[in-house]
Image (cartoon, helix red, strand yellow):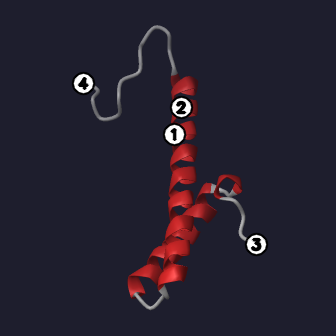
Amino acid sequence: MAKKPENMAFEAALAELEGIVAQLEQGEVPLEQALAQFERGIALVRASQQKLEQAQQQVQILTQDPEQPLQPFGTEDA
């Protein structure tokens, strides 16, 4: 049985998602199986997005300097 997406490492979820996309792009998967794969893919995307958001929050916390507020990436003055 496949692991729940929320219990998978980000990299493993991404690799599985890439495999699902490749299979679906070939168009040779029966409809019922394609729908099941699509559903699994959506779950993988949601879990991966949540992991990315958590990592972003952790980076913000670690880099906070009370004297200098954080700016969004790419908006700092040169």
Which residue: 51% across, 36% down? 56
Which residue in the protein does label 4 denote? 77
List x then y, in percent, for residue 18. 49, 72
Quote the CA–CA distance across marks 2 and 4: 23 Å
Q: Given the current orientation, which residue lies at the most extreme bottom position? A: 28
Rendering quarter of residue 61: top right
Quote the CA–CA distance across marks 3 and 4: 51 Å
For residue 53, which numbered disc appears in the image? 1
Whether residue 73 is situated above or below residue 4 in the rendered picture = above
Discs 1, 4 touching: Cβ within 8 Å = no
List x then y, in percent, for residue 29. 48, 87
Mark 2, secondary structure of its residue: helix
Packing grade of label 4 (10 A; few <14, some 14-19, many >=20) is few
Quote the CA–CA distance across marks 1 and 4: 25 Å
User: Which amino acid, mark 2?
Assistant: Gln
Quote the CA–CA distance across marks 3 and 1: 27 Å
Whether residue 69 is situated above or below residue 5 in the rendered picture = above
Which residue in the protein does label 2 denote? 57
User: Which amino acid, mark 3?
Assistant: Met
